Amino acid sequence: MEYRYTPSNRVCSQEMIIELEGDIVKKVTIIGGCAGNTVGVSSLIQGMKIEEAIQRLKGIPCGVRGTSCPDQLAIALEEAKCKIIGEK
């Protein structure tokens, strides 16, 4: 299943496209942001259980913004988990 998320305007990325296979992150494409970081994070969580990815990424700050692309990805994964898998 595919889930699309528009991050907070406090980060550089403009859209996150998440492909899930059950509770496993199959693929993440992040549009915008620092390519090395966003591609790196996407690669690192590929094949990971959604809950583990959320725990690892949630709360990571970027400067004084109070959020970051990884934190926004955690929020997107929480929403995807809720909407696609039906869990909170």
Image (cartoon, rainbow, N blue to C red):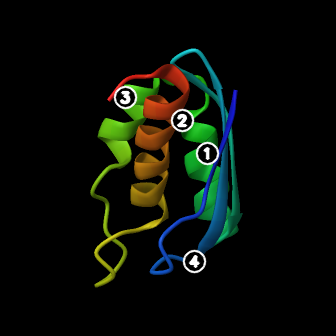
At a point 58% along the width and 15% down the height, the residue shown is: 22
Q: Which residue is mark 2?
A: 45
Quarter assignment of residue 42: top right
Few, some or many residues within 10 Å of mark 4 (<14, 14–19, 20+): some
The answer for how far apart the CA atoms under marks 2 and 3 are is 9 Å
Mark 1 belongs to which amino acid?
A: Ser
Q: Which residue is mark 3?
A: 52
Mark 2 belongs to which amino acid?
A: Ile
Few, some or many residues within 10 Å of mark 1 (<14, 14–19, 20+): many
Q: Which residue is mark 4?
A: 12
The answer for how far apart the CA atoms under marks 4 and 1 are is 15 Å
Q: Earlier in the sequence, mark 4 or mark 1?
A: 4
Few, some or many residues within 10 Å of mark 2 (<14, 14–19, 20+): many
Please tell me whether residue 7 is drawn above or below residue 54 in the rendered image.
below
Q: Nearer the viewer, mark 4 or mark 1?
A: 4
| Marks 1 and 2 in Cβ contact (< 8 Å) | yes
Please tell me whether residue 55 is drawn above or below residue 64 in the rendered image.
above
The answer to which of 81 and 10 lies nearer the viewer is 81
At a point 44% along the width and 22% down the height, the residue shown is: 86
- Measured as percent of width and height from the top left, residue 37 is found at 58, 61
